[in-house]
């Protein structure tokens, strides 16, 4: 090492400075501050970049240069993608931070409701599920011929199709229904494959309220309380105007007598059993006594007949004897004497 004219030289075989660094040193003018150290008698200037002043060294490429080179690699806090830890160092963003889209269930509540929704008071309290555009079944699948696990579903909107009901059970409980039988007036019979799936659908009892184009679904106990409170206060009034169910959806078990079953079908009821239940109040098709959540039922409007007239009316006319028919049309005592006297005269 030799010292000449106050300059420091290290070896005579040192190559010249690269033209790129020479041009960079000529164009950039540095000011002397706390972060700049200049060695007297040397032509080399070293600038140290700290996090306080935010300045960069001339030997480090600018962010624009790196972004043009590789826009997919983000810059770290040191402005370099190789000379600093890539994992432990947080990423420095220029401008507002943008994060990848992550599924957030609460964000779904902020979506605007369709204009046809009636129960808008449940917005923010329960989740609104919009029915997709489903094609109507050209041919509804028949009930299974073998054993199935049926459930009674009530308080459903009249316009709801079996396809929408099957989709709703799949969406809310995860159970796949085999088929759905319509019973009119918003009542259905759902056939399931196993007892576990029937338990899943049974948990939807009082958790779903039908609206136009979709349903309101209560997922937690707090949402169930909000739904029940809303239905008790505003449900009947709004539902009457929009022709919607006045109460939340009912899901109950079905109990069928073995003598009423035909073709091993758990929900097949013979016409004789229906007629018998109409006249005598027995052989009832629906018996929710084994349901976990029972609903109040009305008293049977028909009681067993006590008079001979009602007993004869219950009996089919083809099986009646002549005396039964005469007993059916028995007139009062005053008229009976007159009729018997007229017969003797004839």
Image: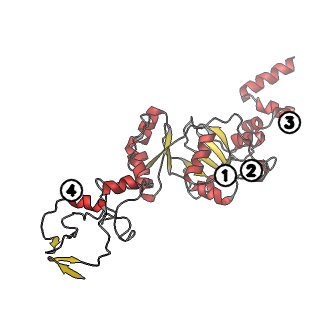
Q: Viewer-nearest of labels 4 and 3? A: 4
Quadrant of image for the C terminus: top right
Of residues 126 and 106, the one nearer the viewer is: 106
Question: Which type of secondary structure does the marked residue at label 1 adopt?
Answer: loop
Q: Are marks 2 and 1 in contact (CB under 8 Å)?
A: yes
Which residue is located at x 76 percent, y 30 percent? 330
Cα gap from disc 4 to disc 2, whole angstroms: 91 Å
> x and y percent of residue 138 in the render?
69, 33
**Residues under numbered marks 3 and 1 in contact, where contact means CB atoms less than 8 Å apart:** no
Q: CA distance from mark 3 to mark 1?
A: 34 Å
Q: CA distance from mark 4 to mark 3?
A: 119 Å
Q: Quadrant of the N terminus?
A: bottom left
- Given residues 62 and 18, the one toward you in this image is 18
Residue 27 image label: 4
Q: Which residue is mark 3?
A: 319
Label 3 Cα crowd, 10 Å radius (few <14 / some 14-19 / many 20+): few
Q: Residue at x 79, y 48 (%)?
A: 145
**Label 2 residue SS:** loop
Of marks 3 and 2, the one in the foreground: 2
Q: Label 1: how many residues lie within 10 Å, few (<14), some (14-19) or many (20+)?
A: some
**Which residue in the protein does label 2 denote?**
266
Choose the circle earlier in sequence order: 3 or 1: 1
Give the spatial CA distance, label 3 vs label 2.
Answer: 31 Å
């Amino acid at each position: 090492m030799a010292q000449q004219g106050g300059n420091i030289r290290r070896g005579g075989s040192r190559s010249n400075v690269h033209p790129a660094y020479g041009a960079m040193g000529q164009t950039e003018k540095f000011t002397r501050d706390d972060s700049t150290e200049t060695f007297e008698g040397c032509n080399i200037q070293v600038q140290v970049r700290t996090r306080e002043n935010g300045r960069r060294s001339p030997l480090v490429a600018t962010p624009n240069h790196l972004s043009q080179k590789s826009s997919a690699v983000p810059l770290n806090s040191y402005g370099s993608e190789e000379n600093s830890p890539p994992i432990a160092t947080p990423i420095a963003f220029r401008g507002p931070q943008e994060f990848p889209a992550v599924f957030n269930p609460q964000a779904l509540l902020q979506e605007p409701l369709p204009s046809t929704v009636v129960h808008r008071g449940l917005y923010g309290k329960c989740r609104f599920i919009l029915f997709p555009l489903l094609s109507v079944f050209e041919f509804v699948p028949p009930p299974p011929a073998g054993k199935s696990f049926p459930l009674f579903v009530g308080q459903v909107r009249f316009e709801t199709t079996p396809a929408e009901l099957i989709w709703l059970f799949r969406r809310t409980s995860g159970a796949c229904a085999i088929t759905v039988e319509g019973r009119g007036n918003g009542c259905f019979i759902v056939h399931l494959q196993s007892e576990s799936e029937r338990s899943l659908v049974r948990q939807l009892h009082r958790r779903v309220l039908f609206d136009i184009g979709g349903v309101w679904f209560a997922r937690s106990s707090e949402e169930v309380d909000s739904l029940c409170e809303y239905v008790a206060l505003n449900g009947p009034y709004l539902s009457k105007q929009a022709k919607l169910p006045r109460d939340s959806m009912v899901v109950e078990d079905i109990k069928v007598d073995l003598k009423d079953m035909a073709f091993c079908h758990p929900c097949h009821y013979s016409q004789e059993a229906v007629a018998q239940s109409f006249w005598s109040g027995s052989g009832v098709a629906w018996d929710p006594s084994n349901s976990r959540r029972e609903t109040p039922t009305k008293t049977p409007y028909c009681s067993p007949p006590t008079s001979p007239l009602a007993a004869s009316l219950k009996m089919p006319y083809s099986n009646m004897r002549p005396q039964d028919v005469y007993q059916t049309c028995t007139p009062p005592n005053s008229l009976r004497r007159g009729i018997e006297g007229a017969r003797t005269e004839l």
